[in-house]
Structure formats: C-alpha cells, structure tokens
Amino acid sequence: MENNNTKLATFAAGCFWGVEEEFRQIKGVRSTTVGYTGGKFENPTYRDVCTDKTGHAEAVQIEYDPNEVSYEELLDVFWSIHNPTTKNRQGPDTGSQYRSMIAFHTPEQEAISRKSKESLQGSGKFKNEIVTEIVPASTFYKAEEYHQKYHMKKGGGSCYVRPMAE
C-alpha cells in the first residue's frame, strides 16, 4: 500500500500480464500487482472475471516513488502500450475485462488523467475516439498468485501489449 514516500496508480489496458511487465521495468516503480477492479462482485477469481459478467477489468496497481517517476510519465507508458480506442478489446482479447481504464486515487490524478486523455485525443495520433474510462479507484482484488509477474516467471506470452495500427 501507499506510504509517505510512494503513491498508487491503477491502470487497465487489456491482459494484465503484459501491462504489468511494462510498468514493472520502469525506474521508480516499487511494486506491481495484477488484479481486478471496477466491478460489483466481491472477491472475484480469474474464472469469474472471464465470464464478462462481474464488471471487473484486469488491472495493474502500481506503487511508485513520485521523486523518481511522475504520474504523467506512467500515463505516457499507459497510452503507449495499448489501443485506447477499442471498447472492451485489446488485440484478440475481447470482453469488458479487457477495457481501457484509469482508476484515479486522488483528485490530482483525475485532473492529470483527463488532461492527458484530452491532449492525446487532440494530437491526431488516433483517428477514432479514445474510449478509456477515467473513474475513481474502487476495491482492488489481487489476482491469483500464478498471475503475479507472469511474464517474469514464465517468459513472454501471447498477451497483446502494443497497439495495432488504426
């Protein structure tokens, strides 16, 4: 959890294995945890979330040192590793659990996230509308242990991580 020297950030950008790996390698990121957030079902399991009926997104919660990496820098990574214009889909993975979402922990994170999204939309990088949800952080349920640091433990996999051309 967050302490005096660190802050939390929570992002959903498709399959959490690849997303976690991208954030885990950033200097200033102290820890990453994959899990489920944004739903209405208590204590969901991976099997529950995969039904696409719990409302949860596969997400990564990041504990970071703001003296080493800024929230804006984390957002830059978030935008660069997925396609924020596809609703409930990243590459071949479909369902609301794969949606693009920023779960903000503070009013400052909300403002920065909204400004970042607006700026990216206006940049012309994407021809389609950015559908990323920006919502207050809700209960984060840690995923099963075998999902934690999956790519580090098992090597690369089939997770979609980079955006497809539009």
Image: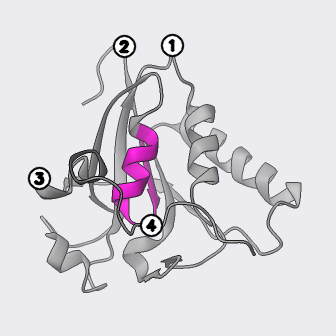
Q: Where residue 12 appears, x then y in whole percent?
A: 44, 59
Residue carrying label 2: 5
Vertical relation: 159 (above or below) 3: below
Q: Which mark is residue 77?
A: none
Disc 3 marks a residue whose amino acid type is: Glu
Q: What is the distance, in whole Å, between disc 1 and disc 4 at their CAs?
A: 28 Å
Question: Is residue 87 or residue 26 the one in the foreground?
Answer: 26
Q: Marks 4 and 2: CB-CB under 8 Å?
A: no
Vertical relation: 55 (above or below) 107: below
Q: Which residues are magenta?
A: 9-23
Q: What is the distance, in whole Å, between disc 2 and disc 3 at their CAs?
A: 26 Å
Residue carrying label 3: 145
Disc 1 marks a residue whose amino acid type is: Asn
Instruction: Specify few, some or many for label 2: CA neighbours under 10 Å numbering under 14, 14-19, or 20 or more.
Output: few
Q: What is the distance, in whole Å, between disc 4 and disc 2 at their CAs?
A: 29 Å
Disc 2 marks a residue whose amino acid type is: Asn
Q: Residue at x 57, y 79 (%)?
A: 87
Residue carrying label 1: 67
